[in-house]
Amino acid sequence: MDYDSLLRKHRKKLLARPEELAVRLNCGREEIIRIIPHREPFLLVDRLTGIDLSSETITGVRCVRSDEPVFEGHFPGYPIYPGVLQLEMIGQLGLCLYYFIRNQVTEVGRDAVPVPIRATRVLGAVYMEPIYPGSEVRLIARKLDFDGLLARVIGQAVVEERVCCVVISEGYLLGD
């Protein structure tokens, strides 16, 4: 797969819009913590807004608070949300996507457990626009492939219709 071409293609073109997905979601942090292992202060997805199992695409939201401690040092006088945390937001959304695909469901079950997958590498990332304190970031992730052991996803962080970041990452399935 030509990852560089995919990254170039999606620097401006959105992978999806929540209203275009087959199922609208309104899953908050309570549901999200049932399907991924992250917790405060490192839970970086606030809400899931849409899922489409046929296109294997999910959307979500992260509200970047102005009072987050990271802004004290990144960067004083010019606070921007770190790129590595943008990657993490998208990765966490990818974990949520894996839950829905693996279970072939469009809602989070009461008995849901965190997905058994861990990040292994970033295959490519491009940053076009900074994310500032107080931004509402729309997150989009789409499955690229899964060979039974490794899953690859492409994702975007979007603020006010501007793609701020596009990333392709890979995760390793730990087993069920």
Image: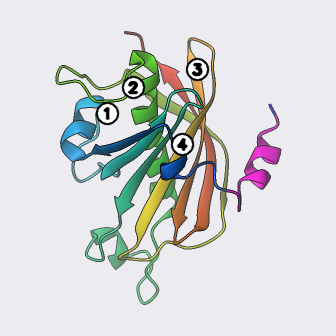
Mark 2 surroundings: few (<14), some (14-19) or many (≥20) residues within 10 A: many
Q: In the rendered picture of this protein, how many numbered marks are placed on residues?
A: 4
Residue pointed to by mark 1? 36
Q: For residue 141, which numbered disc appears in the image?
A: 4
Q: Position of residue 87 (x, y in %)?
A: 51, 51
**Looking at the image, is mark 2 or mark 3 earlier in the sequence?**
2
**Looking at the image, is mark 3 or mark 4 earlier in the sequence?**
4
Type of the residue with mark 2: Tyr
Residue at position x 45%, y 77% from top?
A: 132
Type of the residue with mark 4: Ala
Per the image, label 3 sits on a secondary structure element best described as strand
Queried whether the magenta region covers residue 4, the answer comes back as yes
The residue lying toward the viewer, choosing from 69 and 95, is 95
Residue at position x 23%, y 24% from top?
A: 109
Per the image, label 4 sits on a secondary structure element best described as strand
Left or right of residue 29, residue 125 in this image = right
Alpha carbon distance from label 4 to label 1: 15 Å
Above or below for 155 versus 36 = below
The quadrant of the picture occupied by the C terminus is top left
Left or right of residue 41, residue 174 in this image = right
Alpha carbon distance from label 2 to label 1: 8 Å
**Looking at the image, is mark 4 or mark 1 earlier in the sequence?**
1
Q: For residue 76, which numbered disc appears in the image?
A: none
Q: Position of residue 83 (x, y in %)?
A: 53, 61
Type of the residue with mark 3: Leu
Q: Position of residue 156 (x, y in %)?
A: 57, 53
Left or right of residue 147, residue 90 in this image = left
Per the image, label 2 sits on a secondary structure element best described as helix
Mark 1 surroundings: few (<14), some (14-19) or many (≥20) residues within 10 A: many
Per the image, label 1 sits on a secondary structure element best described as loop
**Looking at the image, is mark 3 or mark 1 earlier in the sequence?**
1
Residue pointed to by mark 3? 150
